[in-house]
Amino acid sequence: MLSDHTGAAIATINDGLIEKLLSYDILVVAGQAKSHCVAWTVSDLLGAIQGRDPQLARNIYLLEDCTSAIVIGETLDFTPQAEAAFQRFAQAGMHRVSSTTAIAHWPTIPKI
């Protein structure tokens, strides 16, 4: 569960969505914002994976060039937090890939 600065709940894990996502052989993740919504969702997914079978992390492909961190002018830049989250996901076995690389060349992708 995510909470705001006062400790009040602002979001809960959608177990139904997590179960649906884990039912696929391959999951490709893209979206906004890499530093927040994407990172939190993938973190929830990783928690479920680690509780079930850590090898499932190898089924997750993170499209690096189809997401970006929140950056607000010179004031706020969450790029370091986004990078730290994606590095943690990669260390768990998820793949960081590019949309410009043919899927057939992604690591460990099943050949169809």
Image: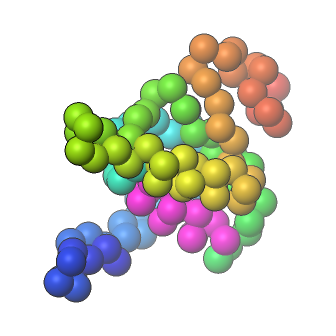
Tell me what residue is drawn at x 69 percent, y 21 percent.
103
Q: Main secondary structure of the magenta part?
A: helix
Front-lying residue, 103 or 35: 35
- Provide residue 34's location: percent of width, then percent of height: 42, 44
Outermost residue toward the bottom in this view? 7
Tell me what residue is drawn at x 78 percent, y 60 percent.
55
From the viewer's perspective, is residue 77 above or below residue 2? above
Tell me what residue is drawn at x 69 percent, y 50 percent.
90
Callout count = 0
Task: Report if residue 31 lies within the magenta region.
Answer: no
Quarter holding the N terminus is: bottom left
User: Is 69 situated left or right of 28 in this image?
Assistant: left
Tell me what residue is drawn at x 21 percent, y 77 percent.
5
Q: Quadrant of residue 50?
A: bottom right
Q: Quadrant of residue 100?
A: top right
Task: Report if residue 48 lies within the magenta region.
Answer: yes
Front-lying residue, 89 or 23: 89
From the viewer's perspective, is residue 105 above or below residue 13? above
The reply to whether residue 11 is in sight is yes
From the viewer's perspective, is residue 91 above or below residue 11? above
Outermost residue toward the front in this view? 74
- Provide residue 68's location: percent of width, then percent of height: 41, 35
- Provide residue 104's location: percent of width, then percent of height: 76, 20
Quarter holding the C terminus is: top right
Q: Magenta segment range?
A: 39-50
From the viewer's perspective, is residue 16 above or below residue 78? below
The reply to whether residue 26 is in sight is no
User: Is 11 situated left or right of 50 in this image?
Assistant: left
Q: How is the image coloured?
A: rainbow
- Provide residue 9's location: percent of width, then percent of height: 21, 79
